[in-house]
Image (spheres, rainbow, N blue to C red):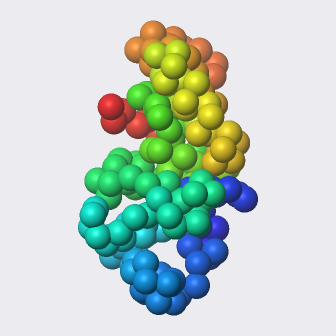
Amino acid sequence: RRSLADSGHVLLDWMSEAAISGGGGGRACRRDEHVPDLLVFKPKGQSDISRVPMVARGELIVQQKASCFPALALAPPPGSHVIDGCAAPGNKTTHLAALMENEGSILAYEQDARRCALLEQMLRERGATCAEAVHGSFLDADPLSPSFALVSHILLDP
């Protein structure tokens, strides 16, 4: 199953079933029972996931399970037009892009210049071409702007 084109969020099809079920060189992990495309590793201190090649190459994004729920709850289908009102550093934004199969558009707002630069880097590195980083506050955006005419979903999760 492909989550995001070429360099995406979590791409389980790159891993063998043996690696997912724990036969992958001692790094036991499993698929999460609630969150599609989430891999669960041994608890902190019992595994060093920074040494997992997919993490080192940027093919897996490390985040807590709870951070996956906002995008899953919003559930924008491919082709949606989405606003992410508090986007940096970009984990939830790239998760949205993955759920949307990189089709449609995401306006990802971040008002802090340094964090917006991090957001832009994350979007570029993960291949989230449907997302655009916007330096500014979502609260200052003009809701009557034509760029919002097709918006169907808004994620506000600081």
Residue drawn at point x = 51 percent, y = 89 percent: 18
Specify whether residue 107 is in view: no
Report the front residue among 50 and 79.
50
Residue drawn at point x = 42 percent, y = 49 percent: 71
40 to the left or right of 128: left
Report the front residue among 153 and 32.
32
Specify whether residue 46 is in view: yes
Q: Is residue 97 above or below residue 123?
A: below
Q: Is residue 41 above or below residue 139?
A: below
Of the 4 image quadrants, the one containing the C terminus is top left
Residue 27, by quadrant, is bottom left
- Which x, y percent locates residue 63? 38, 52
Residue 86, by quadrant, is top left
Report the front residue among 80 and 55.
55
Of the 4 image quadrants, the one containing the N terminus is bottom right
Q: Is residue 93 above or below residue 27?
A: above
Residue drawn at point x = 58 percent, y = 64 percent: 54
- Which x, y percent locates residue 41? 36, 71
92 to the left or right of 60: left
- Which x, y percent locates residue 50? 47, 59
Q: How many marks?
A: 0
Residue drawn at point x = 35 percent, y = 69 percent: 47
144 to the left or right of 31: right
- Which x, y percent locates residue 101? 63, 56
